[in-house]
Amino acid sequence: MNDRELRERVMVQLDRIVDPCSVATNVPLSIVEMGMLTATQIGPDGAVTVDLRITSPMCHQLPYFQMEIEQCLKTLPGVSSVTVTHDHGQNWKPEDMTHEARSKLSLRRNLVSMLLAESSRK
């Protein structure tokens, strides 16, 4: 497997990791969609380093993200090790999300607003 193929497989796996907080809001979004990845490096020996941007300094999900990233990537052929680094939640902003993620959230908010307005008329 060449470097490009391995990078594509790594990104596919990372896109499968869903942010639990987004699930709680009924809009499941991956860490890729959330814009939580700042960098992904793959060394010539297959060592993968993922730089993660958490959404808040108070994020309690960091251990979950680290475990999920390590578990899903270490099973990939060509990956020799996985390291996850992170910031302290200082730099993430909603604009970091993909356009598709922002659209999903907007649709959900509009639906909730519509349902609330409808229920208040009854």
Image (cartoon, helix red, strand yellow):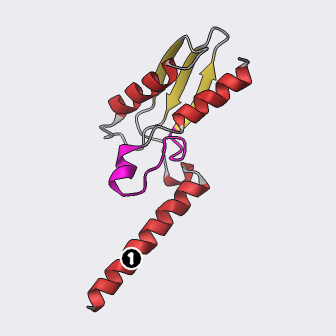
Q: Residue at x 46, y 37 (%)?
A: 17
For the stretch drawn in magenta, the main secondary structure is: loop
57, above or below 21, in the image: above
Magenta stretch holds residue 27? yes
Q: Residue 33: image x %, image y %?
A: 54, 47
Which amino acid type is marked by label 1?
Answer: Ser
Q: Is residue 104 left or right of residue 113?
A: right
Q: Residue furthest bottom?
A: 121
User: Mark 1 falls on what kind of element?
Assistant: helix
Magenta stretch holds residue 94? no
In this figure, which residue is indicated by the disc labeled 1?
Answer: 113
Q: Residue furthest top?
A: 45
Q: Residue at x 45, y 22 (%)?
A: 70
Part of the protein shown in magenta = 19-36
Q: Is residue 82 left or right of residue 21?
A: right
83, 76: nearer the viewer: 76
